[in-house]
Amino acid sequence: MSLEELYREVILDHYRNPRNRAALASPMATAEGVNPLCGDEVTVEVELTDGVVTDISVRGQGCSISQSSASMMSEAIKGKSIEQIAELEHQFKAMLSTEDGQIELDPEQPGSVLGELEALQGVKNYPVRIKCASLPWATLHDALS
Amino acid sequence: MIADVGLHESTWAPIPARFEAGTPAIIESAGLVAAIEYLEAVGMQAVMSHDRALTEYALGQLSEMDDVTVFGPKDLATRGGVISFAIRDAHPHDVATILDEQGVAIRAGHHCAKPLLRGLGVPATARASFYVYNTRDDVDALLTGLQRVRQLFAR
């Protein structure tokens, strides 16, 4: 696992051009997350209609892993139901090895299981950075509870 | 620490015994003595000049890099061998991971000094610091390591 694999183009793209940053006019749910040891910050706002996320905003400041993860998450959950999001969160954590559960990624077909989120699979080899990648998901979890 | 202990209430010894709970830090005290003897053998003047020489070298090199900001005073008389810095386009965490892969250990984050960092207007900094066992080669390793950061984060 090389640094090039950790910092692959997808991650750098999301870091430099983060998606869904515009604040929502009247979000139904919102939460702020912080990694106290390092200062990464993420604020998540969601709009829900009949249990489906119809709009999302993620803002914050921090390292490339936390901010790109927030951006990728925002794209992954748009249009999904709360149940689907819970399943996706579980799969993402399994990919980072922070939760039990198997997730089989197909190296022949990158992105076929978790889409762009698979770009963060390298983070599990850098344990100190796992909290960076999971911060947005923990914050989203708080917003939706 | 205690005068008397009950199931629901306790009473306390007078100060200072009141704040001494249980067995004192015996092992830590032994360690502290060993550390003091070690440094006295090196000589604190020698410790200071070594620290200053490395800091002067590092600050000199870092100030030549126009994508690096060094925080804190440049005057060696008013600073020690702890250098907080930032490099353009790369967050300190990312700098730390990349340097780590090259065998260079720095700290990154707010260093338990959030109000200071807020005052400096930055969310986090990278921080290199030196001890008696560090050498100029270690500083060079840091500087070389920053090249790798530029490689990965170059726009």
Image (cartoon, coloured by chain):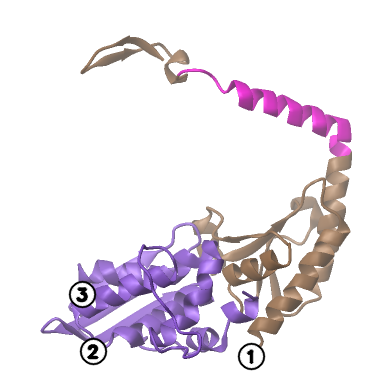
Chain colours: A purple, B brown
> Which residues lie in the magenta part?
B22-45
Q: Amino acid at mark 3?
A: Ala
Q: Amino acid at mark 1?
A: Arg
> Residue at the location (73% across, 62% down)?
B104
Chain bearing mark 2 = A
Instruction: Sort mark 2 into few (<14), some (14-19) or many (20+) by Cα contacts within 10 Å.
Output: some
Residue A1, located in which quarter of the rendered image? bottom right
Disc 1 is placed on an element classified as loop
In the drawing, what numbered circle is on residue A79? 2
Chain bearing mark 1 = B
**What residue does disc 1 label?**
B155
In the drawing, what numbered circle is on residue A118? none
Residue B47, located in which quarter of the rendered image? top right
**Which badge, 2 or 3, is on the more N-terminal residue?**
3
**Is residue A135 in view from this perspective?**
yes
In the drawing, what numbered circle is on residue A29? 3
In the image: residue A126, left or right of residue A102: right
Measured from the top left, where is residue A121 in percent x and y? 49, 76
Q: Is residue B39 above or below residue B12?
A: below
> Residue at the location (58% across, 73% down)?
B91
> Residue at the location (45% across, 82% down)?
A118
